Each structure stands twice: as C-alpha cells, then as structure tokens.
C-alpha cells in the first residue's frame, strides 16, 4: 500500500529529500506522494523514512486507494532500482 500525506502537512520539507524512491514532491498546497513510486521504503529501510522524519504525528498514512501487498511493493522496488539486472 502506498502512503499518503494528509492535510496536516506543514510543508516543513523534511520528507521529500529523505525518500529513496523520489516519490515525494510539492503539490498544489502540500507535499504529495506518487503512488507509482512509493514502496513504503521496502528494499531500503525497515519502516518508511518519511513517517520517521515527519514532525507531525499521523500526517503520513497508508493510502486506502492504493492497496498493495508487501510482495507487490518489493516488485515495484526491484523494477525501479534493479531493472537493468532482470
């Protein structure tokens, strides 16, 4: 399941540079997560880095509109970062 940044976002700029998949960018008014690139940091870290660095609790949540299994997230990671080796 990809993650989602809620309206609680204060645009502190902490999450965007920490995303190893470059899935976070500035939207119209708050940061947004590109669900096609978000792997919840599977393949990189134990827990999503954006959630760890966000200073506002419960601002970055699982996106119910983009349900994915751990295996699907892993496959997405492999395609983004190791497609040349497949």
Image: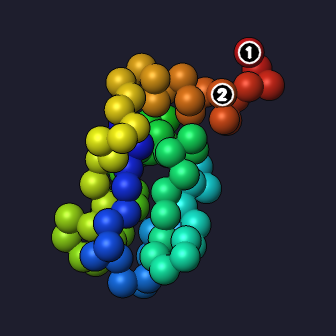
Residue drawn at the location 55% of the way across and 71% of the way down: 27
Residue 20, image x and y in percent?
56, 53
In the picture, the quarter occupied by the N terminus is top left
Residue sitting at the far top: 86
Q: Is residue 8 left or right of residue 50?
A: left
Going from the N terminus, do you reach mark 1 or mark 2 first? 2
The residue labelled by disc 1 is: 86
Q: Is residue 82 left or right of residue 73?
A: right
The residue labelled by disc 2 is: 79
Dot 2: what SS? helix
Residue sitting at the far left: 57
Q: Is residue 29 above or below residue 31?
A: below
Dot 1: what SS? loop
In the picture, the quarter occupied by the C terminus is top right
Mark-to-mark CA distance, 1 and 2:
8 Å
Q: Is residue 19 visible?
A: no
Residue drawn at the location 28% of the way across and 76% of the way down: 8
Residue 72, image x and y in percent?
46, 23
Residue 15, image x and y in percent?
45, 69
Mark 1 vs 2: CB contact within 8 A: yes
Q: Nearer the viewer's eye, disc 1 or disc 2?
A: 2
- The answer to which image quadrant residue 76 occupies is top right
Q: Is residue 57 left or right of residue 82?
A: left
């Amino acid at each position: 399941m990809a993650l989602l940044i809620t309206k609680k976002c204060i645009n502190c700029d902490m999450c965007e540079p920490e995303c190893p998949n470059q899935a976070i960018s500035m939207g119209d008014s708050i940061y947004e997560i590109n669900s096609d690139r978000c792997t919840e940091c599977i393949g990189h870290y134990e827990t999503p880095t954006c959630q760890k660095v966000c200073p506002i609790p419960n601002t970055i949540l699982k996106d119910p509109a983009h349900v994915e299994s751990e295996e699907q997230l892993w496959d997405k990671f492999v395609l983004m970062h190791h497609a040349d080796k497949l």
